[in-house]
Amino acid sequence: MIDALKEEEIVNKVGGRFKLSTLIQKRLVALNGGARPLVNIDSHEKMEIVVQEILQDKIFLDSSSEVKITGAPQDLGALEFDLDSL
């Protein structure tokens, strides 16, 4: 088991055990789907990667329980272009 999960630091950083579980599960789905790790560690164990991403403040849950990457641009929605002005 990953030692960091035994500590309260990671639980407090995320805002509780439920949020921690949600963040871990959603990030694991993303990694399994092909997302790239946001940290450089010597392990290919995805759970260890996720824990390090949390501890290094690379990922967090937003108010709607969606995983967000620190420093990533926010979703701006669909961009509209006025092609008539070209």
Image (cartoon, rainbow, N blue to C red):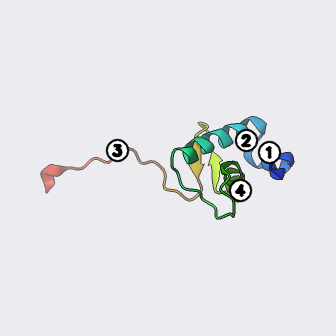
Q: Position of residue 25 (x, y in %)?
A: 65, 39
Q: Position of residue 47 (x, y in %)?
A: 69, 48
Earlier sequence position, callout 3 versus callout 1: 1
Query: How far apart are the two marked residues, 3 and 1, measured between alpha carbons?
Result: 35 Å
Look at 59% across and 36% down and name the residue there. Answer: 64
Amino acid type at circle 2 is: Leu
Q: Label 1 belongs to which residue?
A: 11
Q: Position of residue 1 (x, y in %)?
A: 81, 46
Q: Label 3 belongs to which residue?
A: 78
Amino acid type at circle 4 is: Gln
Please name whichever residue, 53 or 2, is drawn nearer the observer in this view of the structure.
2
Q: Label 2 belongs to which residue?
A: 20
Query: How far apart are the two marked residues, 3 and 2, measured between alpha carbons?
Result: 31 Å
Asked if marks 2 and 1 touch (Cβ < 8 Å), the reply is yes
For the C terminus, the quadrant is bottom left
Look at 24% across and 50% down and name the residue there. Answer: 81
Earlier sequence position, callout 3 versus callout 2: 2
Mark 3 closeness class: few <14, some 14–19, many ≥20 residues within 10 Å: few
Look at 42% across and 48% down and name the residue there. Answer: 76
Q: Label 4 belongs to which residue?
A: 52
Amino acid type at circle 3 is: Ala
Asked if marks 4 and 1 touch (Cβ < 8 Å), the reply is no
Residue 62 seen by the camera? no
Secondary element under disc 4, as helix, strand or loop, is helix
